[in-house]
Image (spheres, grey):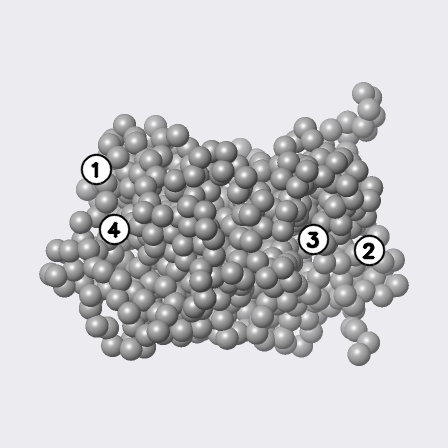
Amino acid sequence: MSEPLLQVDDLVVSFTGARRGWFGPRSELRAVDGVSFSVAPGEVLGLVGESGCGKSTTARAICRLVAPHSGRVRFAGTDLLTLTGSALRTARRGLQMVFQDPFASLDPRYTCRRIIAEPLEGFGLASGEQARQRVDQLMQQVGLDPSMADRYPHEFSGGQRQRIGIARALAAEPQVLLCDEPVSALDVSVQAQIINLLLELRRELGLAMVFIAHDLAVVRHVADRIAVMYAGRIVEQAPADTLFANPRHPYTEALLAAIPIPDPTAPAIISQISGEPPSPHQAWAGHCAFAPRCPHATEACHSGAPELITEADGRIHRCPPRQA
Amino acid sequence: MSEPLLHCSKLSVSFRTDNGSLRAVDGIDLSIAPGEALGLVGESGCGKSTAAMAILGLLPRSAQCQADAIRLGDTDLAQASNRVLRSVRGRRVGVVFQDPMTSLNPYLTVGKQIGEPLRIHLGLNASQAKERSLALMRDVGIPDAATRINRHPHEFSGGQRQRLLIAMALACDPELLIADEPTTALDVTVQAQILDLLRREQQRRNMALLLVSHDLGVIAHTCHRVAVMYAGRIVETANTKPLFANPQHPYTRGLLAAIPRLDGDRGTELTTIPGLPPRLSDGWQHCAFAPRCPHAEGRCRIDIPNMRQHSDEHHHRCILDLPAGDAP
């Protein structure tokens, strides 16, 4: 594999909660608990997991929208976590986010043109007439009619707004797009349009992506490699085909079995596991977070923390070999 | 088909707004046989939830509902007084709403809430109601029900709250359960559990089910028959297998083709439906899908197409004869 473009090592993000009692210690919530992965130039890494597993927080911590507790994020040779101020702003230009909610992530008082031009001017990439032309060009690139540039976000539909968000991210000329659930707020017929757009941009611009979603079929379609998160940790990471053909971690297995396939002749979906994802307030220092729901859990799973195991087919997971 | 349990004919709902009247549901016919599971599927704003809520008269005041008939057994809900409707809601028809966070009363213990329909409709006293509530909580898989019956909703997780809502809807053994996007707010592993539960209870009680959903996967696994809605009208209805195997309406075909498949080629371009879902208007005078339809001809933009029969129980609302098995 070529030199990774983005490398995340042992990232930990924690939030402090309410005090216990009036003067007691604040409770700590570990949203991301030692996540490591890397993304090669032009590669798409899918990050999947259920709500509250820390996938969005991981993306936000990578570009320092939330402050990580510890860990390392190397992007194009620099450690983003040690930078501050203008050095940080310059370094993370190549790392742009596309947010989930196309209604909340655009300033309602800005026109579409101003939204897309902001990164151009902020990073000094273009100004004046040059910026105007670049905005028109970006709008065309994402499938919007440049004649609509002077409208406000509320005049666009959800899918169009998501296109504006993508154009804004592209304006900074990034190498990596961090897409946080970019299609989950959209209807099926529009979702397919946005997925096609992202795939096309990837082909044309050679963009790498971290693609976060909870819809496994969407992630499988877009990503080269998939990392499955549970309770703040990556429990399995493998090339997309390998993961789907032969999931190794029991949580991945359960997740795949639970997908409702739009085909009535397909085998019935099975709820292999009972219970629900744990609250992030629980600390899992000692043992596997999935053990309480795992159908294969043994004594050992409830005591020791599972190590990362790397297998020959490029798969990395956190589940000791099972006795048949 | 046997005598339907529920039969709506020409159900329409309009909303009065500042910009005139918007027709959310435009003359739909629906029927559900006893013990049958019908899926009502469509994208946001197509009128599926409005249609389901109109059956029970659960619409906001700005809505005007018209129907030739909404027959539940021998009662016509369209003509019924509020008194009659109240005796039907929760007794003969149970409802599960989408959002488990806002559909429970935060002030009351869950036991009180599950017991409420039992006391009101069946006249049980408090201790009888509590006993039945406890059995219902066990039925829907709430662990440690005996102690948790006195807890408040915030002490339950999202999936458990949805189970409680289902328990409440099932309390009086309804003939029909209306479930409006019951799993949309839930994670996929929890969704699988709730769908299991719904399917099991539906079969065990031989209860009819109207499942409203945008997710064709959920519908495929739960329903016997499917009705596809677009812009307030039903554009296609058929038994589940033929609908998925051999969709007739170009919208149904487009919808099915736009979903990424687990066995499809990765990274390939997905088939899309061009354009945007339609805005609501004061009723379409022609086929509402024509502006987005790749097959549309001049005659599609003249008249509202009638429902046509494709085969026995397979009807669709498209005047064109599309070649079989063709992509959208």
The amino acid pointed to by label 3 is Val
Residue at which label 3 appears: B140
Q: Distance between the residues labelled 1 and 4?
A: 17 Å
Question: Quick one: label 1 or label 4, which is nearer the N terminus?
Answer: 1
Q: Is residue B4 above or below residue A133?
A: below
Q: Which residue is drawn at 87% across and 63% down?
A: A300
Question: Quick one: label 4 or label 2, which is nearer the N terminus?
Answer: 4
The amino acid pointed to by label 1 is Glu
Neighbourhood count class around disc 4 (C-alpha, 10 Å): few under 14, some 14–19, many 20 upward:
few
Residue at which label 1 appears: A129
Q: Are marks 3 and 2 in contact (CB under 8 Å)?
A: no
B293 left or right, relative to B252: left
Q: How far apart are marks 3 and 2 (CA)?
A: 30 Å
Residue A248 in picture, x, y percent from top left: 68, 71
Residue at which label 2 appears: A287
Q: Do labels 3 and 4 share a chain?
A: no
Q: Distance between the residues labelled 3 and 4?
A: 52 Å
Q: How far apart are marks 4 and 2 (CA)?
A: 51 Å
Where disc 3 sits, the SS reads loop
The amino acid pointed to by label 2 is His
A78 left or right, relative to A208: right
Q: Nearer the viewer, residue B278 or B9?
A: B9
Q: Which chain carries label 2?
A: A
Q: Are marks 3 and 4 in contact (CB under 8 Å)?
A: no
Q: Which mark is residue A140?
A: 4
